[in-house]
Image (cartoon, rainbow, N blue to C red):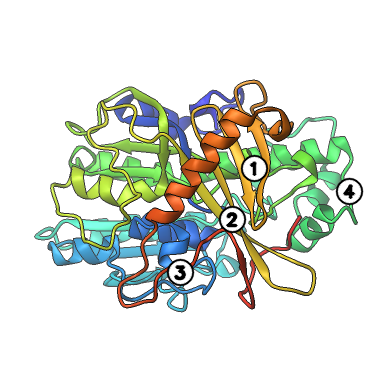
Amino acid sequence: MSVYGYGRPTTPRMGSLAPEGTLFERAYTASPDDAASLASLLTGRYPPEHGLLLIRHLRDSINTLPEVLKESGYATRAITSERQMSRDSGLFQGFEEIDVVDPAAAEEFDGGAAEVSRRAISWIKEKWDRKKPFFMVLVYSSPLLPFHPPDDYRFKFVDPIVVRERVEVVSEYWLPFAEKYNAHAADLSDREMNTLRDLYDAEIFYADARIGEVVSMLREMKLLDDTLLVETATRGEDLGEQHRLADASSLREANLRIPLLIRFPGKAPAGLRVKGLAQNVDLMPTILDLLGLAHPDTISRLAVSLAPMESRTRRTDAVSTAVQSRQGGPVDLFASVRDERYRMLVGPEGPAGLFDLQSDPEGSVDILTRAAEPAARLKKALGEWDTSLSAAPGTAPLPGPIQAAPGAPAPAPKP
């Protein structure tokens, strides 16, 4: 993303918003699983607390952000092309109106992005009751494998030396291919991997353009400066690093780091770049604080409000969790815990890797056996996080999260 310093102009519209708001430079998802990540954003709770990571359903007893805002007089609406955001998942809890875009039925083969923006613009212009403020969540499923941006965008970043026919083949690689690739049963040449990354960049550019349409409409209607705007993502993406591709169980840095921009004149300082750690689990308390609304008691005590934005250091660590399945057996819950410099991977049997992200930004060199002090510090931080987790109201106490979970479903195979 060029807003974070990438050399290609992949996010010019988000980049134009950054000087008008606060950009968090090191924000992380609570889980690389899209549905669990969305649940953390909407509940202010970590995956072991809201239930969606393992039981695949958000617990009804948890107060969601749209529920709180609805009770405070807001019209609440969700427009989504993400199939995991459904009634079965419980992620519609609190939304008065729900608009599901079928990516397969979209006129453009774009994951439904253009249609999500069109419906948002149409609702605000034509159907919004001006007597009530609104809370709207727009969920774009792109970028998502297959990386197949519309024709006008597909070749924006592709090296001209690559023949069009080969670009079309690479743009059709889907999740079954990724599973084979992750299992080392399929491979990509260096040129094919570069083309795949080119297409991913084009999808980011395209999504940025579609989101930009909604922002431009708000600006034209003179609503933008009265609107709290949050732009973020559920997760990042592995693009061939350590032979991983589109892996929803990956706890690598590339998969966990997410963009986070908050624009709210008078409350989110213009042009501020926050270097401290943040997580998407922090967004519910942050939004409620910025709007001057009380927190429900179901928000995790581990969630940290990012307001006021000028207080740049709040978190000393960030924890993300994912499930990984064993061949023919149960699934295990893994965690990534990081501080300002180090990241540690922890599994059912304890620490499984330690990485110095200052000297090794991609986290590819394991230093666990030769860095006892940071390993002990992060293990202690994870233990404190573990004991501070709270069960959903009306449910049994939580078991320790970093352990086997027999019989639970897993969204992706263990690498």
Amino acid tagged 1: Arg
Distance from label 3 to label 2 (Cα)?
Answer: 31 Å
- CA gap between label 1 and label 3 equals 22 Å
Q: Which residue lies furthest to the left in this view?
A: 131
Number of the front mark, 3 or 4: 3
Query: Residue at left 67%, top 33%?
Result: 363
The image shows residue 197 at horizontal and vertical percentages of 71, 39
On-image quarter of the C terminus: bottom right
Label 3 and label 4: CA atoms lie apart by: 35 Å
Task: List the residue tagged with mark 2.
Answer: 110
The mark found on residue 252 in the picture is 1
Q: Between disc 2 and disc 1, whose residue precedes?
A: 2
The amino acid beneath tag 3 is Gly
Kind of element beneath mark 4: loop
Which is nearer the eye, 245 or 344?
344
Instruction: Measuring from the top left, give residue 246's x and y in whole percent.
Output: 69, 52
- Residue hosting label 4: 187
Assess whether mark 4 and mark 2 are in contact (beta carbons under 8 angstroms).
no
Horizontally, is 236 left or right of 246 in the view? left
In this view, the residue in front, 368 or 47, is 368
Q: Quadrant of residue 190?
A: top right
What is the x, y in percent for residue 83?
53, 68
- Under mark 2, the amino acid is Asp
Asked whether the beta carbons under mark 2 and mark 1 sit within 8 Å of each other, the answer is no
Dots 4 and 1: beta carbons under 8 Å? no
Mark 2 vs mark 1, foreground winner is 1
**Residue 415 vs residue 369, the one in the foreground:** 369
Question: Which disc number belongs to residue 122?
Answer: none
The residue labelled by disc 3 is: 51
